[in-house]
Image (spheres, helix red, strand yellow):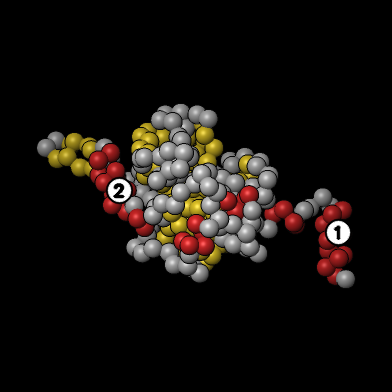
Amino acid sequence: MNLLLLVVALGLTGASPLHDYKVCQPHSRPWQVYLHGGGVSCSGALIDSLWIVTSFDCAPTSFSTIASLGEHDVTVDEGTEQHIYVADVIRHSPYFRSPMHSLTMVRLAKPARFTQYIQPIPLPSRCPQPGQTCHVSGWGSTIPNQYDRAKLLKCISVPVVDDHTCINTFPEFLFWSLGMVCAGQANTDNCMHDRGSVMVCDGQLQGVQWFSHGCRNQADPSVYTKLCKYNNWISDVMDRYTPTLTTGTTTVKMTS
């Protein structure tokens, strides 16, 4: 009875508890990055003062796309943000209709300043295991077949699913890659409409969204890039593309 009265009262005041329960605790994901501008609106993860990891499908444009860090509500200035242009965009290849890889590295035009609202997420020291609970975040709808962008960062929890179970849900035109990991199943929050949404397991970056199958059918796992397979590639890109500064006779890599 008390619950019914609460629902009625909220309805009368215009509140809608059914739509906001998947909103993240504000600034609880200090590594989350909002990439926008230049025809782009998607998420990524800050892994270093200069570097962001996102999916292949998120296609930032150098010096047109802005990386907004320290965001929660992307429609207002919260006083926690840093807005930095994207400088370099390095996309993993090959990527065809049925891609073998889905990963993009984004270098910022200047280093981010770390604060309580802006922090990098560690790369994986191990691969995620079936049954493990992970957390996905992004600025997208969590409702199947609704594609409106969200103004507040959303969070869902998903279980990692074994490869065989995931492969059995693939449509005929899609082929399995060893660079994939799947998470989500029936009776779980298994939909995030945000290209490059970030999957974190035990405090480590384990995935960026590849295919949001859970938004098509919540019984199907969504597919993420299995980042534990790409540590060497990520490190190589950072080594090759991080600018160097020369001061007198000393040359050093740019850092924060």
201 w.r.t. 223: above or below: below
Residue lying at 48% horizontally and 53% vertically, measured from the top left: 224
238 w.r.t. 133: above or below: above
Local crowd at mark 1 within 10 Å, few (<14), some, or many (≥20)? few
Q: Position of 44 compared to 153: left or right?
A: left
Residue at image mark 2: 233
Residue lying at 64% horizontally and 53% vertically, measured from the top left: 217
Residue 112 rendering spot, x and y as whole percentages: 39, 44
Residue 256 rendering spot, x and y as whole percentages: 32, 46
Q: Nearer the viewer, residue 109 or 4?
A: 4
Dot 2: element: helix
- Residue 62, labelled with which disc? none
26 w.r.t. 127: above or below: above
Residue lying at 28% horizontally and 52% vertically, measured from the top left: 232
Residue lying at 59% horizontally and 57% vertically, measured from the top left: 220
Q: Nearer the viewer, residue 152 or 246?
A: 152
Residue 108: in sight, yes or no? Answer: no
1 vs 2, front mark: 2
Residue at image mark 1: 9
Q: How many marks?
A: 2
